[in-house]
Amino acid sequence: MKHRIGRVETQIQREVDDILLKDVNDPRVKGVTITGVKLTGDLQHATIFYSILDDAPDKVEAAQTGLDKASGLIRREVGQRIRLFKVPEIEFAQDKSVQYGARIDQLINEVRRKNLE
């Protein structure tokens, strides 16, 4: 069963990324990248993680609002593209790991600069 959940998560990630590129015309979601999907064990709820190039708080909030507005369209399209008994409820969440990785890189570069001095 775990393998099936992983396959469905990957398929949903691929489809949602494609839907955002081709079907959603909201300018608030331009530049949004889907980084992962987490499904519950019963495949009823999906949390879709995204990152955005410009991580300014107002841009992130606008992207979240745009994704929330488009969630009905995205859920319907996922249901048409993937054969599931019931299409999961979709929730979007910002992926903080990208920001965390950037902060780690910044700290490493600062340490290197200090060691060179």
Image (spheres, rainbow, N blue to C red):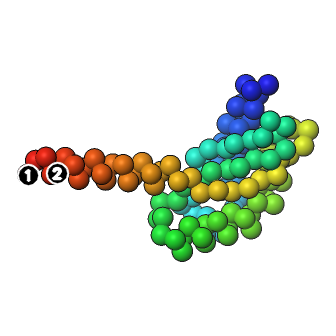
Query: Looking at the picture, does residue 92 appear above or below residue 27?
Result: above
Tell me the distance, in whole angstroms, between the alpha carbons under discs 2 and 1: 7 Å
Whether residue 77 is visible here, answered yes or no, is no
Q: Quadrant of residue 51?
A: bottom right
Task: Find residue 87 and report its horizontal and vertical position in percent.
Answer: 85, 46
In the image, is 74 to the left or to the right of 113? right
* Crowd class of label 1 (few under 14; some 14 to 19; many from 20; radius 10 Å): few
* Crowd class of label 2 (few under 14; some 14 to 19; many from 20; radius 10 Å): few
Q: Please tell me the numbered disc located at residue 113.
A: 2
Which amino acid lies under the numbered mark 1 shown in the image of this protein? Answer: Glu
Residue sitting at the far bottom: 58
Q: Residue shown at 90%/43% (left/top)? A: 86
**Residue contact between numbered discs 2 and 1, judged by CB atoms under 8 Å:** yes
In the image, is 39 to the left or to the right of 59? right
User: Circle 2 — which element?
Assistant: helix
Q: Residue shown at 69%/42% (left/top)? A: 38
Q: Residue shown at 36%/49% (left/top)? A: 104
Which amino acid lies under the numbered mark 2 shown in the image of this protein? Answer: Arg
Whether residue 95 is visible here, answered yes or no, is yes
* Quarter of the figure that contains the N terminus: top right
Query: Looking at the picture, does residue 106 appear above or below residue 84?
Result: below
Q: Residue shown at 68%/50% (left/top)? A: 48
Task: Find residue 62 and report its horizontal and vertical position in percent.
Answer: 61, 72
Q: Please tell me the numbered disc located at residue 29.
A: none
Query: Looking at the picture, does residue 23 appear above or below residue 56?
Result: above
Task: Find residue 3 and report its horizontal and vertical position in percent.
Answer: 73, 25
Q: Which residue is mark 1?
A: 117
Query: Looking at the picture, does residue 9 appear above or below residue 18?
Result: above
In the image, is 15 to the left or to the right of 75? left
